[in-house]
Amino acid sequence: MLNYIYLIASVAVGSFIAAMIRNPRTAAVKMLLTFSGAYLLSIAVFHLIPEIYQDGDGKVGLFIMGGFFLQLILEFFSKGVEHGHSHIEMFRNKGIPLSIIASLYLHALLESLPVGTHGEHGDHTLLWAIVIHKVPVSLILYVMVAEVFSSAWKIILFMLGFALIAPLGVFLGETFAFLVDYSREITAIVLGIFLHISTTILFESNQSHRFNFTKLFITLLAVMLAWFTL
């Protein structure tokens, strides 16, 4: 139950921040994205890679690359919302593109499946990686949705729908035995997704190729937090 609460709360936190600032392009949001990207990458390296390779089966690498390219395809439809692209102009006076919503929902569902397939208590390291990642994604999505709906209740209902997708993924992972049987392969796919998102965030945060002490500090902080919370 706590897994569900944490995942829903991450969307609530991101939505609350968005309602306060109404601008996803601030320096603070960029730092939050940098932190989430560095944390995702660290969890992938420190936790997920050792876990899926512990049996010595090199074929699992195919699933990692499959997840990497799957995210590449999803990004084509989502326009990169998962790693910080807001594209507010796409929503303004045009409605919500179904392709963006479908790809975001599928992404949220896939990444949460391994939390459920890891047993009764789930994978808490992976859970917190998803929670941290969902905060900036929810922030950006909220701002985009607010361009379409003037009613606060419609915005809340839409974000609630997004918040329930990840818990659904955990529930499916816990409930269906065949998903548990393929837990390692599913985790490898999610690892590939994380590698794509995290590296994209970190590369895009340093497009100027200038030394930025704040970004370096935020990145190292995320790495250390990931290491000490394993």
Image (cartoon, rainbow, N blue to C red):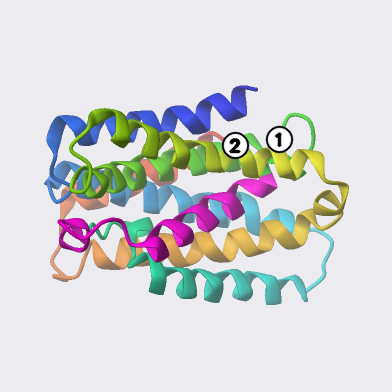
Q: Position of residue 169 (x, y in %)?
A: 64, 44
Residue 218 visible in the displayed image: no
Please give the range of residues in magenta. Answer: 87-114
Left/right placement of residue 190 relative to residue 132 reads right
Q: Is residue 106 magenta?
A: yes
* Magenta stretch, overall SS: helix
**Residue type at the position of mark 1:** Gly
Residue at 87% across, 47% down: 177
Specify the quadrant that holds the C terminus: top right
**Residue 211 in which image quadrant:** bottom left
Packing grade of label 1 (10 A; few <14, some 14-19, many >=20) is some
Look at mark 1 in the image and give the residue it sits on: 122
Packing grade of label 2 (10 A; few <14, some 14-19, many >=20) is many
Q: CA separation, marks 1 and 2?
A: 12 Å
Q: Is residue 184 above or below residue 134?
A: below
Q: Position of residue 99 (x, y in %)?
A: 41, 65
Specify the quadrant that holds the N terminus: top right
Look at mark 2 in the image and give the residue it sits on: 167
Q: Nearer the viewer, residue 114 or 57?
A: 114
Residue at 43% across, 47% down: 39
**Residue type at the position of mark 2:** Pro
Q: Nearer the viewer, residue 100 or 46?
A: 100
**Which marked residue is nearer to the observer: mark 1 or mark 2?**
2
Query: Tag 2 or tag 1, which sits nearer the N-term?
Result: 1
